[in-house]
Image: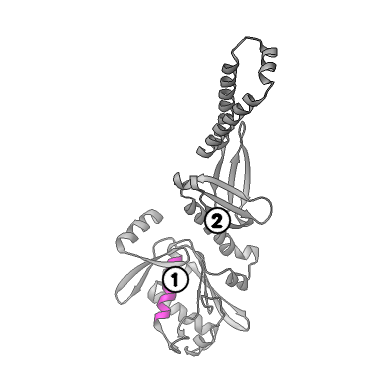
Amino acid sequence: MIKSVIAVELLAGFSLFALTELANFQTIYHLLFGDFIRYDYFLIISASFLQIIVTLFVFLRWHNESYEIREKEILIKKGVFYVVQNYLLISNIKSIISRQSILEKLANCGTVIIKKDSGKNIFIRNIENAEIIRDAIKNLVEKNKILIGEEKKFSVPDLILSGESHYLEFKQGLRWDQKQKAVNKGLEKAAMKSIASFLNADGGKFIIGVADDKTVYGLEQDYKTLPRQDRDGFENHFNHIFQSMLGPRFRQFVNLRFEKIDGKDVCVVEIKPSDSQVYLKQNNAEEFYIRTGNTTSALTMSEAQDYIKSRWG
């Protein structure tokens, strides 16, 4: 808005200067209007009127422009003398970035640029908390891709290529530590921490058998550490540690399925948001985790209480 007003002032000043530089404009003015109003007054009044008209236009355009972010779409309202509504589907967003011009930095605001699969980019200009808005839309794009992935028939290789995000995490194994070449119970806790964070947030997917760098290791080494060395044995062990650390009541929000990638088994853990808070229990202690960005974050008990109150009431 400030930038537009400055542009209006410059335009009005330039227009006034251009009129005074026209050699015959004053003669034409006197032929048309005679001595009805002094020439210099006419220039001032004309420039002021132009400023008012253009400023009013800029204000109406700014005032009537709004964006409503919904779960599956963004409602865009624009117009000067009447408002036109358009919808941008979240699924049609290719990427999203934010930037700040020098004036926006001074005004503590920024611009969010939404790049679509086709057509012109959308610019949400001069808004406060541009980075927060950008991240919120990014999360919706990821959620649409991952949580509704079955409807769009996203394969597990597609998910792996997309990389870790707010709604997707990889674990190289559930028990077998590739570096130590031995069973590591700490990996089981790390897996349950991540699942708890998804349950306490917006849900997501958790793929076991894939490293952070997207390398597919599979579950074969995990299988070898179990009494029953197959998918059923793996799921039985998963259920045992889940019930021990998170509680059997929350198993209803978690679904396991196995797929072959490059000839290797991987386990896709699909997690829905829980209807109440989930604590990780171990050694007579309770810990609370949530998903922040593409990481699992622990909250203190006081932070957890505030979070629980705001999320579940």
Q: Identify the amino acid type marked 2.
A: Ile
* Region rendered in magenta: 186-198
Left or right: where does residue 271 sit relative to residue 281? right
Image x and y of residue 210, in percent = 54, 78
Would you call the spot at circle 2 few (<14 residues within 10 Å), some (14-19), or many (20 or more)? some
Q: Is residue 73 above or below residue 45?
A: below
Q: Identify the amino acid type marked 1.
A: Ser
Instruction: Report helix, strand or loop for mark 1.
Output: helix
Instruction: Identify which residue is drawn at 70% across, 17% down.
Output: 28
The answer to which quarter of the image holds residue 291 is: bottom left
Instruction: Identify which residue is drawn at 62% across, 9% down.
Output: 36
Q: Residue furthest front?
A: 23
The answer to which quarter of the image holds residue 84 is: top right
Disc 1 target residue: 194
Disc 2 target residue: 97
User: Is residue 190 in the magenta section?
Assistant: yes
Q: Name which of mark 1 and mark 2 comes first in the sequence.
A: 2
Q: Nearer the viewer, residue 83 or 63?
A: 63
Q: Is residue 85 above or below residue 249?
A: above
